[in-house]
Image (tube, rainbow, N blue to C red):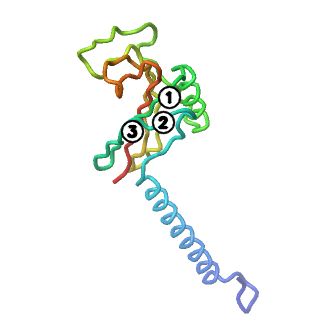
Amino acid sequence: MLDSKGRISIFRVSVIGAVIGAVLIIGGILSFNNDINSRRTPLNIETFVNAELWGAPREQGTTRTVFFRARGATVEQVVAHYQQQLTAFETGQRCVRTPGTGEIPVDPTLPNSVPYRYDCMFDRSGVNSTQYTRVTIYPGIANDDPFFDTSDSTVIAYEQVWQP
């Protein structure tokens, strides 16, 4: 960094500064691209231990809906599992119950009618990128059709959205 006269060479300091700056800029661009590319797949959240896939996942573009059922598990056990996942996810979020207390009367004419549900949002969205999984948990409902009868189960629905 010193010239032949023992003084600091402005040219050599400038070249070293430019090289360090270029390395930092290239590293930042590569890091940003890796982060964006990591959001081009669904955000997979570990399912409840006893949960089994219920039906075929529905995928449309960059959105996927997957249903699971946990036979013999209570809603509270399943919510506790996902609340633990949220805590590990470090968002500070909590699973939210709708309605806050009590139950809504189930309307047998509506296929999606449930007495209450919990929504747990796992979100990794960022600048110009989207990636989240909303986990909805609700008690099973009796049905005459054996496939749709979930009276012995807790139902878990994943709604996954990611970056195209």
Local SS, label 2: strand
Quarter of the image holding residue 132? top left
**How many other residues sit within 10 Å of disc 2, few (<14), some (14-19) or many (≥20)?**
some
The residue depicted at 60 percent of the width and 31 percent of the height is 84
Q: CA distance from mark 2 to mark 1?
A: 6 Å
Q: Amino acid at mark 3?
A: Val
Query: In this picture, is 79 found above or below 25?
Result: above
Quarter of the image holding residue 37? bottom left
The residue depicted at 53 percent of the width and 20 percent of the height is 74
- Which residue corresponds to mark 2? 52
Q: Residue furthest bottom?
A: 4
In the image shown, does 161 or 114 lie closer to the viewer? 114
Callout 2 touching callout 1 (CB < 8 Å): yes
Q: Position of residue 113 (x, y in %)?
A: 31, 18
Q: Position of residue 110 (x, y in %)?
A: 25, 18
Callout 3 touching callout 2 (CB < 8 Å): no
Q: Quadrant of the C terminus?
A: bottom left
- Which residue corresponds to mark 1? 70
Callout 1 touching callout 3 (CB < 8 Å): no
- Which residue corresponds to mark 3? 66
Q: Is 50 on the left or on the right of 151, as rendered?
A: right
**How many other residues sit within 10 Å of disc 3, few (<14), some (14-19) or many (≥20)?**
some
User: Tag 2 or tag 3, which sits nearer the N-term?
Assistant: 2
Q: Quadrant of the N terminus?
A: bottom right
Q: CA distance from mark 1 to mark 3?
A: 13 Å
The residue depicted at 28 percent of the width and 46 percent of the height is 60
Q: Amino acid at mark 2?
A: Glu
The residue depicted at 56 percent of the width and 72 percent of the height is 23
Query: In this picture, is 8 found above or below 99?
Result: below
